[in-house]
Amino acid sequence: MQGEEEELSVSIAHIVQKLKGTALHCQLEKEARGSLFNPDIKLETLKEDIKDFLKASGWEKKLQNAVYRELSVLPAPCHPAAPAEHIKEPLAYMRRAQASWEKRVLKSLNSMCTELNIPLARKRPADEQKELLNKWNEMGTDEPDLSLFRPVYAPKDFLEVLINLRNPNYDVGDQPSFRTHLGLIQVPLNIKDIPELREFFSELSLNTGQLGVDDSTPVPPALWSRTAELFENEHFQLGKKVLAEHDSAAAQQYVRQGCPTALRADLWALILNISEHPEDILYYEQLKSNVIQHDLLSDSLIYKDVKLTASNDDYYFVFEDYLYQVLLCFSRDTSVLEHFAYNSASPPKSYIRGKLGLEEFAVHYPPNGVIPFHGFSMYVAPLCFLYHEPARLYQVFREMYVRYFFRLHSISSHISGIMSLCLLFETLLQTHLPQVFYHLREIGAQPLRISFKWMVRGFSGYLATDQLLLLWDRILGYNSLEILAVLAAAVFAFRAMNLMEVTSLAAAEAVLADISTLKVMPLLQIFLFAVVT
């Protein structure tokens, strides 16, 4: 009990410290001082009267949402005396693996810099600044020569690192048993089994109404039409009430059954505690100014990635300008560095020329500490369907990244980390679809080699956009990425008969090459609550 109280006090202190100095803190102080002139505020009951005033004026709800946001990203409680690296990642061998991977990525970046004789950063000449400013909203029409640039790494490179990772303190033994994991991931991590997944995703049960699933239920069309229309209408009205309450926790619970298209943008912003204050727009403009003034080598990596991915996508090519704007500003945003407190990764450093190794001359590079890789722009692309104001789009993406997406390209033992997702996917297949798993393994088509690219991108670029947004509803609703691994396994279950007939990795990849026609929610529901026993 005493330990729990200590953990609670540490969490409270952390949240108070985070909120101090924020715009919300300043506004609350201003409102509290202003309330002193209210004749209803009595000196004898000053504290309670001010609390009642803040509650009636809506500021208490804003404070609750801010606290809830901090709780959503707060690392798991550690001992108060635990060193900072244990908060980032408790397992030492995971920290070493992440550090080794970072060195490899930096080596790739530095070698490109040397080969092309291009500086990591430079100040743009005045005429170049003016030109970029003039074409800020039409950067997609620009065709810079990117032929010599290459992504620092692709998902398949990252997968090889995860496959080769081992726990030095864990002896698997030479003799296989019924407990032996025969997948590519050979690291023991704590993941959920099917009963635990069913309990965790209980709102996805077959008895619960869901947006995006009712049109697939096996009931007479006339009956389905009335039932679906009734549920959609009720759910829509409930969604409007949730928005009117301005309650992040209620919105998060609500989206577990899906978001109506008309409400999704506002509900996601409420869950993520995204505000529309003038200072947020000013901050975005400041980042834009930094892009105009300085050219970074990482800018070319962003251009290259957008050209290779989103620009060639039937859904997202029209948002090319938005992608450049958001990602270039994101690379300059030093507030992103705060998430490294609970990210197993560490931001790369660069040194002023001639001062290598001297910490006082070190700067983070890029300024946000995140080096873009092949497919990075696909984290932003789906959001362009929801938000048409660049500043708001930027805020939502940044919050999605520091809550969820960073876990998909860093090595950690977190339950939503990519290592755990890979292990969960393979375990689900090996346990509940053993024939498919063993057949693919025998022909050299390990399932993870096919599904990894889906999970590392959050299925962006692989599912139809309406289905992808339904999937991301549940990521926000459950504050977890585990649903990505469940969906990946569900796709294999859906194509099981075809996969049992293939005889090579290429044939298996061909069977699963196009999953854009699949309906996400029926797959998840049937896999979790009907097929798997």
Image: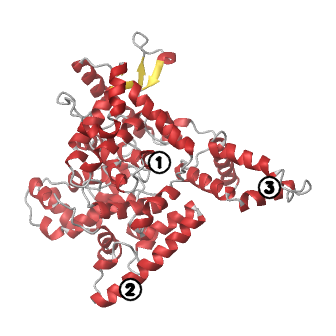
Callout 1: 10 Å neighbours few (<14), some, many (20+)? some
In this picture, residue 17 sits left or right of residue 497: right
Specify the farthest residue to the right: 44
Residue 275 percent across, percent down from the top left: 55, 51
Nearer the observer, 58 or 223: 58
What amino acid does circle 1 point to? Glu
Residue carrying label 3 = 50
Type of the residue with mark 2: Thr
Residue 399 is marked as 1
Decide: is 351 above or below 148. above
User: From what the image shows, is residue 238 above or below residue 512?
Assistant: below
Q: How many marks?
A: 3
Q: Secondary structure at mark 2?
A: helix
Tag of residue 227: 2
- Eye-nearest disc, 1 or 3: 3
What residue occupies the far top of the structure in this picture?
A: 354
Residue at image position (28%, 63%) is 489
Q: Earlier in the sequence, mark 3 or mark 2?
A: 3
Which quadrant would the N terminus be assigned to in this image? bottom right
User: Disc 1 and disc 2: Cα gap in Å?
Assistant: 36 Å
Q: Are marks 3 and 2 in contact (CB under 8 Å)?
A: no
Amino acid of disc 3: Ile
Point out which mark residue 115 bears.
none
Binning the other alpha carbons within 10 Å of mark 2 as few (below 14), some (14 to 19) or many (20 upward) gives some
Can residue 380 be seen in the rendering of this structure? yes
Of the numbered discs 1 and 2, the one sitting upstream in the chain is 2
What x and y, as percent, mark residue 108?
Answer: 27, 27
Q: Is residue 368 visible?
A: no
Pinpoint residue 204: horizontal percent, then vertical percent.
Answer: 40, 72
